[in-house]
Image (cartoon, helix red, strand yellow):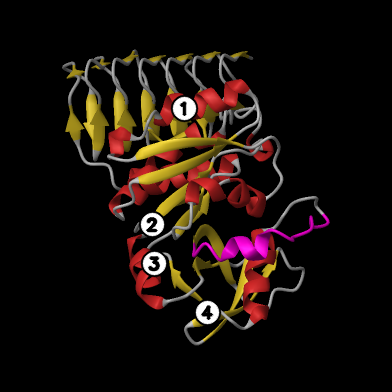
Amino acid sequence: MKAIILAGGHGTRLRPLTHAGPKQVIPIANKPVIHRIMEDLAECGIKEVGIIVGYTPERINAIKDCVGDGSKWEMHATYIEQDAPRGLAHAAWIARDFINGDDFVMYLGDNILTGGINHIVKEFEKSGAAASLLLTESDKPEKFGVATLAGNSIIKVEEKPKNPQSNCVITGVYLFKPVVFDFIKDLQPSPRGELEITHAIQRIIESKKYKITYAFVNGWWDDAGTAEAVLHANQMMLQDVRREINGTVKQGASITGNVSIGTGSIIGSGVIINGPAVIGDNCIISGKTRMTNVSIGDRCKIHDADIELSIVMEESVIETDKKIINSLIGKRSKVTPTTAGSTLIIGEDSEVSL
């Protein structure tokens, strides 16, 4: 079995963070989203992964720099360029030569889930089904692809229906036999101008020749499509952090709960860190800084700050005695005195002083 990861898209819902780079490299608890996906695939024993990338050299290179050749996960990564966001079915179609007749997993690159996908892969391999979908229940199914179930099979799928017949939504993990390409090749663009993978799946169902099975997420799922979703995922992933102090904690600092501090980081006297929290490598945290439920990337400098429920990406500088909460701060950004209770969503190389 092979896999393809869809790592294109413009990430418009996450701007300004995605003006300069793809959302798949945004760190969740200091680990890029796409690294978590590679871990899920490696756990299933998959050795060949095709990564769909686009649409500018900067975005393509950001993914390549983040994943490399895949050897970190004992896999081989092949990069497949997509010229424009033409839909999930189009992304699968351009990977058909890479798939070369094998069964495959299609994993959307902004998906974050716990529990992995090993259970659905194993069930699919012995089911004889043409496709299998990873599902979860949602109180807003109209925002997603929706699956209607009957017993162990899916009998209907719809893309963002106005009146959903089910609250079971497709998470963005799909398993296919190569026969799916027979149902993609004649697809026409949907009203939003894309080739929808749900339309191909519905065609498979209507052919009555093949079975479509499913499994539910073992845990929780979210897509990292909005700032709120990214921050929620970060808080969920922080729950798995273990206390690990690899840096220097000076006398007079207070470290409470599960806090991971990276190599070379210095936590100054008077600093208070309440877990769960992750501090990257070679950070300097000083002054009266107080942090709760945060992820701080490598080589950050933070002085006299009060940060809560936030992500601060690598090489950022924060020097303010005012509270920053529910914020996403892009890499190499600088934040100086702000109004109390500020919520900041800023892209990389930004400077904020209010």
Q: Quadrant of residue 341?
A: top right
Indicate left or right for 20 with 186 as reference.
left
Q: Secondary structure at mark 1?
A: helix
Indicate left or right for 92 with 304 as reference.
right
Task: Check disc 4 and give the amino acid type.
Answer: Lys
Q: Quadrant of the C terminus?
A: top right
Q: Which residue is mark 4?
A: 211
Q: Mark 4 or mark 3, which is nearer the start of the sequence?
A: 3
Indicate left or right for 106 with 280 as reference.
right
Q: CA distance from mark 1 to mark 3?
A: 28 Å
Residue situated in front as seen by the camera: 334 or 280: 280
Task: Check disc 1 and give the amino acid type.
Answer: Lys
Q: Which residue is mark 2?
A: 1
Mark 4, other Cα within 10 Å: few <14 / some 14–19 / many ≥20: some
Q: Which residues are magenta?
A: 176-191
Q: Mark 3 or mark 1, which is nearer the start of the sequence?
A: 1
Residue 213 vertical placement versus 309 (above, below): below
Is 141 contained in the magenta span? Answer: no
Q: Are marks 4 and 1 in contact (CB under 8 Å)?
A: no
Q: Mark 4 or mark 2, which is nearer the start of the sequence?
A: 2
Q: Would you say residue 109 is visible in this rendering?
A: no
Task: Check disc 2 and give the amino acid type.
Answer: Met
